[in-house]
Image (cartoon, rainbow, N blue to C red):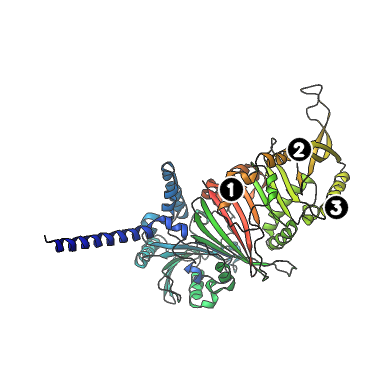
Amino acid sequence: MKLRSFFSFLIAGVLALLGLGAGGFYWLSTQTPLNLLAGGPTTTPAAAVFVSKEVPLLVSMLVNPDRLEALRQVFATPEERSLAHAEFEQIKKSLLVNTNLDYSRDIQPWIGDEITLALTNPDFDDRDRSKGEQTGFLLAVSSQNADRSQQFLKSYWQKQSRADKTVQSELYKGVQLNYKKLPTAKQKAATVLPFNPLALPNSTLPSSFATAAIRGRSDSGNNLNFVLFSNSPNILRDAINNLEAANLNLNNSSNYQKAFQQLNQGRIALAFVNLPQPATEQNLQVSPNSLAVAVGVNRRGLLAQTALVTSRETTASPTLSEPVPALQYIPSASPFAVASTDLRNFWADLSSVVSVNAEVSKLVDRAIADIQQSWSVNLPQDIFNWVQGEYALAVVPSSSNSADWVFVAETSADSLQAIDKLDEIARSKEYSIGSFTLRNQKITAWTQLTTSSNYGRENKRKNAIVTEAKGVRATVGKYEIFTTSVEAMDAALKAAETGSLVANQDFQISIEALPPANDGYFYLDWPSIRSIWEKQIPLLRLIELSARPLFDHLRSLTVTSTGEVAGIRKATIFMRLN
């Protein structure tokens, strides 16, 4: 071989190898599940064109389930991978229970990168009250192979028609609809069962089950190859109408567009809620209109951004660049803490927001009532009104079955007068007010004399009268510290010397994914607080059952507010997972 031919051959070989290497690198970079850390293939659900602007709830997963499972496998240890696979398989089976469908055989060959569920109306059959309330739903599953998905529907309904003579078919505006016909006889109202999002109602198909296949592209170029499922053919007809009339669908809602413009991180899932408005006019400081949530993947868990669209057009920048110094008095072992500034203003805004929803309002009121019962004070009037600087509220592990509370607040011009009022409340309840020294600090305690339950049993010399602390207070530097026990006060004072929550490694990991400019933190160590809150909040058990895979792996939950832009309040949530 001549030298020139050899070099020509060598150069051609090198170029070929470079081409193969570049092609291989491109394939790996596009196919690797690690790409999901930057978000899914799409940023907003194309299926939003099928639902109306007034839809109560829309939830979308913007990634193929198999890619999500692949990402879970990347971060799982070799010992955890089989368990992780089993969990995903269980979810798939739960979603298809009693449908005679198999995910691998019937769904996997054509499913694309979007699954959107919308609750279209609270009662789609409100003309017939004998059937009870029947929530209308629309499930839109994108198809990456329109022919395979249509073949799936054809095969499914052929099997159904052989077994059930109520199967109907019709052509509506060029779209084939298939559905089970509603029974003509009136039925009794269905028993209300606990809601399980991982299973269809009552673990069986609804009495009216309808499907349709949509093919084509939207005006913006988005893929509109979708398979639609619903519990009423009327809902599918409405979906087709919404697609044709762009001004009717959610994709052209101003609140929907404004909210998601503020959520700029990579996302694999999102949710949008049109919040119910009060039936009567209320003089609210802030009236919330809608809420958008975008969920992304972090190497340690899930990172979500929220945007609350309100009635006002104010803009406010975050007030903090680091955790408030008041946290130095929160013990490292605290499983729950809230820390920020200007509690008075925060409570006023929170009251306005939650008052729109009766259930949420009851939940907040109950949490406040539990604390008020421990301290025998009216928190909004006696505490919140004078706290305009830093504050921190936390649960402290206790040797008894009930947890202790610690509240740290920066002193203000009104704090001395507020403390005098607390002393008056204590006296009105016939509590004694006394002082003692603890860790070289003057401590004031509100106490009550009670009879010892052990008197005369184990030790004849035990005192018949014991002193029970109803509240403990101390002024330390520029802070007022309140606790529900002397033990909790000792832990708070010791925290500043030996290590507080801020120095806790778990807390540091839980806030490192959040924006450094924020308005404070809500921190929850789930394994530590789980047993305490399950006793106090019965509803929590139902929530856990509905999202058991998430709660089984939840390590901590941290929430922070990140300011307001033109009336849109933003927050970031980090769910650290095991």
Looking at the image, residue 551 sits to the left or right of residue 461; the answer is left
Q: Look at mark 1 in the image and give the residue it sits on.
A: 508
Q: Amino acid at mark 1?
A: Gln
Vertical arrangement, residue 103 with respect to residue 489, above or below:
below
Q: Is residue 102 visible?
A: no
Query: What SS does tag 3 mark?
Result: helix
Q: Amino acid at mark 3?
A: Gln
> Which comes before the other along the chain, label 1 or label 2?
2
Label 1 Cα neighbours within 10 Å, binned few <14 / some 14-19 / many ≥20: few
Residue 441's image quarter? top right
* Viewer-proximal residue among 187 and 88: 88
Label 3 Cα neighbours within 10 Å, binned few <14 / some 14-19 / many ≥20: few
Whole-percent x and y of residue 145?
A: 36, 65
Whole-percent x and y of residue 557?
A: 59, 50
Residue 486, disc: 2
Q: Nearer the viewer's eye, disc 1 or disc 2? A: 1
